[in-house]
Image: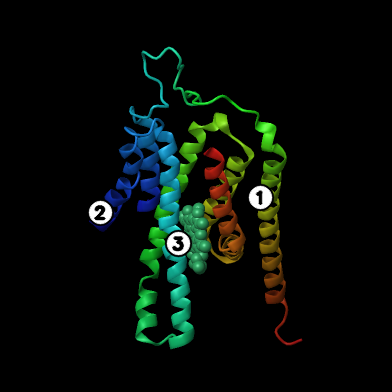
Amino acid sequence: MKPSILAGLVLVAVLATNPNLATFAQEDDDDRESLGLTEREREREHDDDSASGGLTGLVLIGTIIAILGVGGYAAYKVIRIRSKASKPKAT
Amino acid sequence: MKPAFFLIILLLAPVAAYADSERQDNPVTALGWVAIASGLLGTVPYILYNRVKKISVVELGGGDQITRDLAMQYKPLLNVHMALNIIGFTAGAVHGILLIEDLDTISLSLAIVMTVLTITGIILRFSSGNLRVFTKLVHNQVILSGLLVVLIILHVTSML
Ligand code: HEM
């Protein structure tokens, strides 16, 4: 296995098992259940998410369009290269 | 010996996440900063290196000693790029999963772009032929790296 991949896996293992991570449940902590993976203390009130919803929704749509666009462009390029390569040299 | 040394150095990188946990009330937030830092360290020098190498080829020619010396550094620098970005991705992903409750559209966009870049990077390293051409075109796209930077800035500023 590549050292870099191994290092990534080890990092996940270290993070997942580290008892110092506040997010993971302590036995004497009533508020936390199970591993507490999705639970944490709320520092602030959950303010209305929709306040900037319209704009941030655009960010997500833009992101997806950008990725699909880049993917489409790359696929188009590959197809162009292939069809050119398979044609006979002299035309 | 060499791989072992490499591994040990890599394992020191996430230590920063714990170093801050005394001061900061949420070490998971620090994990996000680890992701940003290792991503920057893994990518900015690598892009600069590739620029300099290209300039050297154009200005001095492929046979020049400087160009050759630069070319010798390709593999180690690529390894650093891959290793730090995998660490950064992992740190960012754990950070995101632990804070999944607060998911918003900017964070989701960021996670998508991170994942696309990481997956194409890994495929790029191990593929050949058409798949390699495709992933290279996607992975090296300035739009995606630029989008990543913009989303990181939006993500961080929206948390303030
Ligand atoms: C997630 C953030 C990442 C970003 C922003 C990023 C960005 C880049 C950029 C801009 C280049 C082109 C450098 C240049 O030619 O100027 C590049 C190349 C490359 N990256 Fe990444 N990368 C990321 C992650 C990864 C990962 C996780 C891997 C693999 C495990 C990877 C593997 C590669 C490889 C193999 C190349 C060389 C392409 C070639 O041979 O031309 N990258 N990356």
* Above or below, comparing residue B25 to residue A8 in the picture: above
Compared with B127, A11 (above or below) is above
Rendering coords of residue A63 (x, y %): 66, 50
Left or right, A86 with respect to B63, comes to right
The quarter holding residue A77 reads: bottom right
Quadrant of the snapshot with the N terminus of chain B: bottom left
Residue annotated with mark 2: B5
Name the spot of residue A90 as percent of width and height, x first: 73, 87
Camera-nearest residue between A75 and B44: B44
**Residue on which disc 3 sits:** B44
Residue B86 lies, in percent from the top left, at 44, 50
Q: Is residue B114 above or below residue A75?
A: above
Please rate how many residues cluster around mark 1, counting C-alpha atoms within 10 Å: few if below 14, some from 14 to 19, many from 20.
Answer: many
Answer left or right for B61 relative to A48: left
What is the spatial separation of the Cα atoms under label 1 and label 2, in whole angstroms? 39 Å
Real-space Cα distance between discs 3 and 2? 23 Å
User: Which color scheme is applied?
Assistant: rainbow
Tell me which label, 3 or 2, sits earlier in the chain.
2
Relative depth, front residue between B157 and B61: B157
> For the residue marked with disc 2, what is the amino acid?
Phe
Give the chain of mark 1.
A
- Tell me the residue at 34%/31% (across/down): A18
Find residue A63 and name its label.
1
- Residue drawn at 51 percent across, 26 percent down: A38
For badge 3, the amino acid type reads Val
Is label 2's Cβ within 8 Å of ligand 1?
no
